Image (cartoon, rainbow, N blue to C red):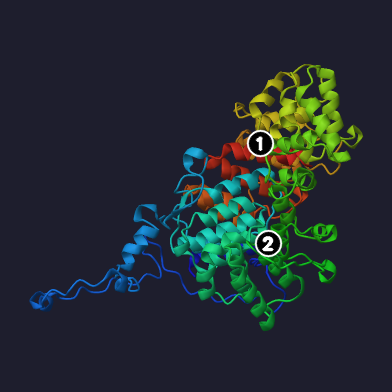
Amino acid sequence: MGDALALALAILAFGLPALGQERPESILPPGFDQPPTPSPSPVPTTQQTPRNVAPPAPATTPLAGLSDPVAPTEPLSELSGTPLPIDPVLIAEYEMPSYARRSLSRIGIVGQAQGGLSPTAFGSADGRYLEALMSRLRAPIASRWLSIGLRRALASRVDTPANVNGADFAAERAWLLLRMGEANVSRAIIEAVDPDNYTPKLFEAAMQSALASGDPALVCPVVDDAKRVSSDRAWILAEAMCRALLGVPGEAGALIDAARRRGVARGTDLLLAEKVVGAGAAGRRAVTIDWNDVDHLTIWRYGLAMATGVPIPQGLLDSANPRVHYWRALSPMLDAKTRAVFAERAAAQGVLSNIALVDLFGEIEQADDQPIAEGTIARDLRTAHSEQDRTRRLAALRALWGDPKTFLTPYPRLILTARAAAGVAAAKDTPEADKLIAAMLSAGLHKQASEWRDFVDVGSQGWALLTLGERSFIGKVSVGDFNRYRGGPSDSAGIKPKLLLAGLAGLGLLDTGVSASLARDLGVDLGSQNSWTKALDQAVIARQPGTVVLLCAIGMQTTDWRGVSPLALYNILSALNRVGLEGEARMIAVEALTRL
């Protein structure tokens, strides 16, 4: 596979959390999850040739016809059953004009002008190396802000790297996005590839994305082609569902009945597919779903239940992978009350923004049947945003933040209150200053947070957060100022000063000598090297921000910030900062001190 792929495998094996070869989740029960071995895909070219279109027939020499007498004109009625000879290439041009076809050489949904990375974000990196990293990355990761940066990199309109097919590279990106909980972005990446360019890997990713979105119709344009290249029995059921959704219930019912006779699926898995068929146009099949025989939630069961509005038992949802909770937080099929149960967790992971979270609770606040807990949150949030009296506004914020005796405020509540906190005027002797600053920075509101610079004491939590997160701060922190920081009462293990050191050093806010001295005092070896740090350095030198973001995520494969070492944090921040992603680096540094 080459040196690059070997390096990728070495990175994944050296000193990092255990990784599994996490393939797309099996759709059907054991025995039905043996996908075909994909044949090697051709390297993409910028000019696409329509697939399944026969070449034009060679023109016949008309010399003999010139001497023949002109044939008499035949009645139109006699010609009505004879198709006129039309060039199939011409037909393809009408179906998909050449100017409308999208190249596999550059795929994505976010351009550089919209905030995406540059088309050359992966530079000359070997595509096999990048795919190996993506396929083995265990998501979700610890950091909200690194997750946001990774989503941005995967969604950007970037050049397809060398040695991979563009559709395959899109499939790998889509599957990683799905594991991160980003079902909507995953779907958009898949839809950025023309159906006639799909590969076996992209067919598989499309099925997974359709189910995560609760929309099996997503695969209908490609179901016939998928059946020709895939032996996965899910496509047999997909064909039946698509026939029903296209308004051909007779064919759909026959296909479902045939699938039952052949044992394609059984039990709840088959009944859910049959329920989709019954929900299609003119569908007449009434199906009742009984979950008693189901002991775990697969993506097949989840997706078809969502598509048909079948309630999923809470026990199955509670035991599901966290990514399922993020999919539900994004789903337009669920009401605000249901999505709110998962929304705060999704916001903490970066799947939902502060604005989306506030809008969701605003919808709950306006509903007639407010749930008690969510309704209380919604009313306090309205007060925190609209109350003109500073004391009452702060009281509403404290109610949302929780018991002050625990010191720690749930991170999602900081995100929820970010813009409400920005509405509190900076002033001396404000006991809530640290949390107000943390809330604003949780949503990236560094300009608003910087107004508190003159009202926080050096060495306080607010001072540390502003020093890391305020982009206008470009000075150097002294040893004396650093040593005044203690991390606060929540830091019983004394880890926060080490993370602050990693943050300041990674962002270049410490002189080299000061950094080395503080590292010795705290017992942190910032100069330690391994295969992962070397790969990061190589990607930085090659000016590959996309590769850097991906490698940073590789170094943060844990769901708990306590599993992120100061050394890993230092290398992540330093690499991001050096390739021009200073904003992301600063927010990750702030998040480290906020969430512990």
Residue situated in front as seen by the camera: 379 or 26: 379
Crowding around mark 2 (Cα neighbors within 10 Å: few <14, some 14 to 19, many 20+) is many
Q: Which label sits on residue 28?
A: none
Amino acid type assigned to the residue bearing label 2 in the image:
Ala
Residue lying at the far bottom in this picture: please name it: 262
Q: Nearer the viewer, residue 585 or 477?
A: 585
Circle 1 packing at 10 Å, graded few (<14), some (14-19), many (20+), is: many
Q: Position of residue 306 (x, y in %)?
A: 71, 57
The image quadrant of residue 21 is bottom right
Residue 448 locus on image (x, y percent):
67, 24
Does residue 399 sit above or below 63 in this rendering? above
Q: Which residue is mark 1?
A: 504
Q: Earlier in the sequence, mark 1 or mark 2?
A: 2
Residue bearing the label numbered 2? 279
Q: Is residue 117 left or right of residue 592?
A: left
Residue at disc 1, secondary structure: helix
Q: Is residue 583 left or right of residue 269?
A: left
Amino acid at the residue labelled 1: Leu
Extreme residue toward the right, this view = 405
Comparing 174 with 270, the one in front is: 270
Counting from the top left corner in percent of width and height, residue 162 is at: 43, 60
